[in-house]
Image (tube, rainbow, N blue to C red):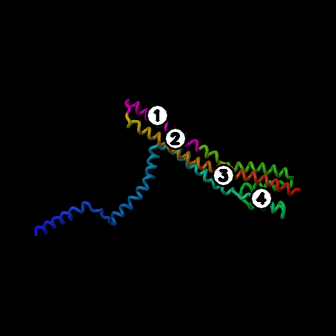
Amino acid sequence: MRKLILALAVVGFFAVSMPAYAAPVITPATVLVQEEEAPAQEASFTQELKKRFIEGGPGFMGIVLICLILGLAIAIERIIFLNLATTNTKKLTAGVEEALSSGGVDAAKEVCRNTRGPVASIFYQGLDRLDEGVESAEKAVIAYGGVQMGQLEKNVSWISLFIALAPMLGFMGTVIGMIQAFDKIEAAGDMQPSLVAGGIKVALLTTVFGLIVAIILQIFYNYIVAKIDSIVNDMEDASITLVDILVAQKK
């Protein structure tokens, strides 16, 4: 009997003690709370970015943001324009040569009219002056090639301006933040970290945002310049080929 009572006491002791060491109970309410907390953590990055932007000062940070918006708008417009201006020059040259052989100048000009891009426009101008001689056609090709090159490079200089302007504005914010920090030290007559922390933070934030904007725009700028160089090389190569075709047709 005593052994039975002792065994029941031990079992009761463990029964009372086990809830303290048991695994947490997962209920539907717990799962719902965890699902609601996940989006809050994802949105915290946007909130933190907005907070840092406001702390950097609306004056300089607003100008840096405008540089980013305008620079991206011009970059996207140029990328779309350059992609539309890219043509298969070999296919166009073959089509023009075949049209010249079969249908004459008018047929070749029709092929150029139905093809988009600066190369087709240059070919059309050369063919349009062919009745005045091969030399006149070559001069027209060279002159109109310069016009098309200007169209390709349109507004690209603004992107380089924003690339240079964004970090300069950030550095200016840095200087102003440091001046504010030293003004507070001078007014207080004592060097305390709490006095200069705000000014130094503003200085660092403006610099960081300015550099980020410059890096983003620099990537787009390099892509645009490389694309322009590729199209210009195709234009020059195709122009030389067109002149050779015209010379061969005149013989």
Q: Which residue is mark 2?
A: 170
Three-letter residue code for mark 1: Ile
- From the image, state whether disc 2 or disc 4 is nearer to you: 4
Q: State how far apart marks 3 and 2 are (Cα).
A: 30 Å
Specify the amino acid type for callout 2.
Gly
Residue lying furthest right:
251
Residue at horizontal 43 percent and vertical 32 percent from the top:
183
Q: SS at mark 1?
A: helix
Q: In this picture, which residue range is highlighted in magenta?
A: 162-191
Q: Tell me which amino acid carries mark 4.
A: Thr
Q: CA distance from mark 3 to mark 4?
A: 21 Å
Helix, strand or loop: magenta stretch:
helix
Count of residue discs: 4
Residue corresponding to mark 1: 179
Coordinates of residue 52 in the picture (x, y in percent): 45, 46
Q: Residue 227: which disc?
A: 3
Q: Are marks 1 and 4 in contact (CB under 8 Å)?
A: no
* Above-or-below relation of 85 to 162: below
Determine the secondary structure under disc 4: helix
Earlier sequence position, callout 1 versus callout 2:
2
Task: Residue under label 4, please give it.
Answer: 93
User: Do the residues under discs 2 and 4 have CB atoms within 8 angstroms?
Assistant: no
